[in-house]
Image (cartoon, rainbow, N blue to C red):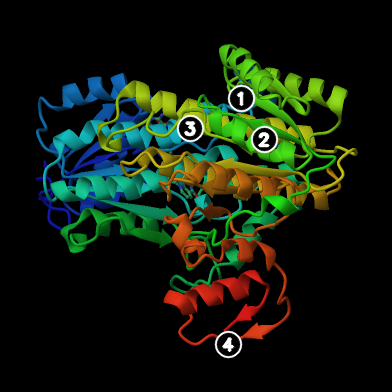
Amino acid sequence: MAEAKKPTGLLSGKTVLLTGAAGNIGSQIARDFVRGGATLIMTGRTKKRIEDARKSVLADTGAAANQVLTISMDGGDPDSIRDALKGLKKTVKTIDVLINNAGSAGPKQPLHAVPLTEDEMNAQGETETAADAMRNILGVTWNVTRLVVPMMKAGGSVVNISTIFSLTRYYGRISYVMPKAALNALSELMAQELGPTGIRVNTVYPGPIESDRIRSVFAAMDKVQGNDSGTIADYFTGRMSLTRGTGKAKKEKSLPTPLDVSGACQFLASDASQALNGVDLDVTNGMSARRDSRSTYLTRPNMRSLDGAGLSVLIVAGEKWDDALEIAKVHMDAGAHVLLGLARNADVAQAEARVRALEISDRLTIVRFSRAEPDGMEAALAAFTKEFGAIHSAVIQTLKPAGYFTGPLSEAEDETVTEFMDSELVGSIGIARTLARYWRGREDLIQEPRFVFLSTESDGGGNAYSKLISAGTRQLVNIWRDESRVGQAKGETKHASWGNQIIRYSNNEAENGRFTAGHASALSCNEKKVAELDLYLPSDIADETGARSGMVGFAENITGLHKGKVAFVTGGSAGIGGQVARLLALAGAKVM
Ligand code: NAP
């Protein structure tokens, strides 16, 4: 029998654990890594599937049997990973490289139809609920990383596979792109956490990869949108700047291939990239995507001009609902009727008592509104509407207060990961679905519906969990806006919904709550339509809004005063010049 080939190459001497190794991209990575000299641990959920995949890698590469190992584990179940690693540790002591390639495709339904229960999933012929997809995308990478990192040492490399669609619009795929967007933040935060231990974490963003999976996904997306077949594929290939041709084949815009993704992974796994940490590599044939969409508030909210007369606003409170009451008060002062949705029955009783004592209950209805109970949320909206008319906007808090989820993400407990994903990320999808359904096709709205998500205030410790939520929420807002715009164009709904998220953890001051309440109200009362998805509180409200120069009262009165004028301000980037430039901008001037 011929002697097996000795491993030589870029990855020689490295022990690599690859998840999703039997899949489309995974099986290409497996072959290339084995050819590159790595000792490879292929993982998958099904023993037979992963064993068959190993046989085919050995046959194709001619590698020695002991160069390719397998373990089977469900990355969504931490105990299953623990069991698999326990067996592995008998032969493998150290893992040098972890490639987090595993990830499911999630249900292919627009927000208003996303399956939240198994019955809904079965009725639609889907194989996952939104919660399953969260676990099979974000959960798998998070769980595998936190359990494998203790087997890694300085010089180790973690590569997470995201998708470029976590940054773009992607109709009908919220259950896939929201967990991937949170995964992007997880990657970035883990790069900061693990960097000091010598372990680096980088992210690959594949575009649509030539595969059966992408063809069936695009076909499903065209179907739910009512497009001609091929519309989505043409749209994305049209956005690629690179034209490639292989051999004598005609040069044309084409989808990148599994080989292209594997190439990026090889680079990030190898010592050739040892100075790279927290880096994003797009494998998209040049399809670019905007990485953030943000602005920072430079003025205090102008409560006096707020007009909420005739509007009804839903405020979905978290478990710490004092802030929600503040937001409710600002809306009621502006003339709006508020439906305050509280997470627990006990909160409802307490809030009603507090409101009675404050004598502010004339335009306030308080109900239980649990983001884990879609039917209950729909019933609460229907009951309110019957009595008081349509709800036009919603302000949505996180369920848990700042600091509830805390500590390094790489050391998170099993229960924390599960509770966090369910309560905050899947919970937000639940609320969004409820509202998307409620607003779809309504004839009784007097203006376009608005939604505003609020992050928690600062936890004083880096805000890692809040950053995961806001990364996911940004993509939720992005997709929701786009899907409702498409729905309006198709005549499914009269008004397209519009929303933003306000990021509060950028500020640690006592004024945070009132500042947030005022700006959230301006958005929900339709006073402003802001294009950016993320709206940050300034770190120092007094400084950034000009209060130190005693000009805030003045600022509130000059809005629009110099509209249409152009102002030249020399030295306008800092100090007094900067304040002048800001005030002129506030007054509507174009500042040069
Ligand atoms: P694929 O053929 O469907 O493979 C995905 C793999 O993920 C499967 O082998 C599956 O393992 C594994 N997986 C799913 N849930 C899991 C869980 N709970 N625990 C363990 N493994 C789990 O998909 P692909 O096209 O190769 O995609 C690979 C990666 O690239 C994914 O992260 C995907 O999001 C990303 N991506 C793909 C494209 C594309 O166009 N195809 C574009 C952008 C990004 P089993 O073998 O156990 O079923």
Q: Amino acid at mark 3?
A: Met
| Residue drawn at (47%, 58%) of the image | 542
Q: Quadrant of the N terminus?
A: top left
Displayed quadrant of residue 127: top right
What's the residue at 55%, 54% (across, down)?
Answer: 535
Q: Position of residue 218 (x, y in %)?
A: 62, 48
Q: Residue 109: image x %, image y %?
A: 66, 37
The disc placed on residue 568 is: 4
Q: Which residue is mark 3?
A: 134
Closer-to-camera residue (374/489)? 374
Front-most of 192 and 138?
Answer: 192
Instruction: Name the N-terminal-most of marks 3 and 1.
Output: 1
Q: Earlier in the sequence, mark 1 or mark 2?
A: 1
Q: Residue at x 62, y 57 (%)?
A: 233
Q: Residues within 10 Å of mark 3 (few under 14, many from 20)?
A: many
Viewer-side residue, 495 vs 285: 495
Could you tell which of marks 3 and 2 lies nearer the N-terminus?
A: 3
Write down the residue under mark 2.
329
Up-down relation of residue 232 to residue 508 (above or below): below
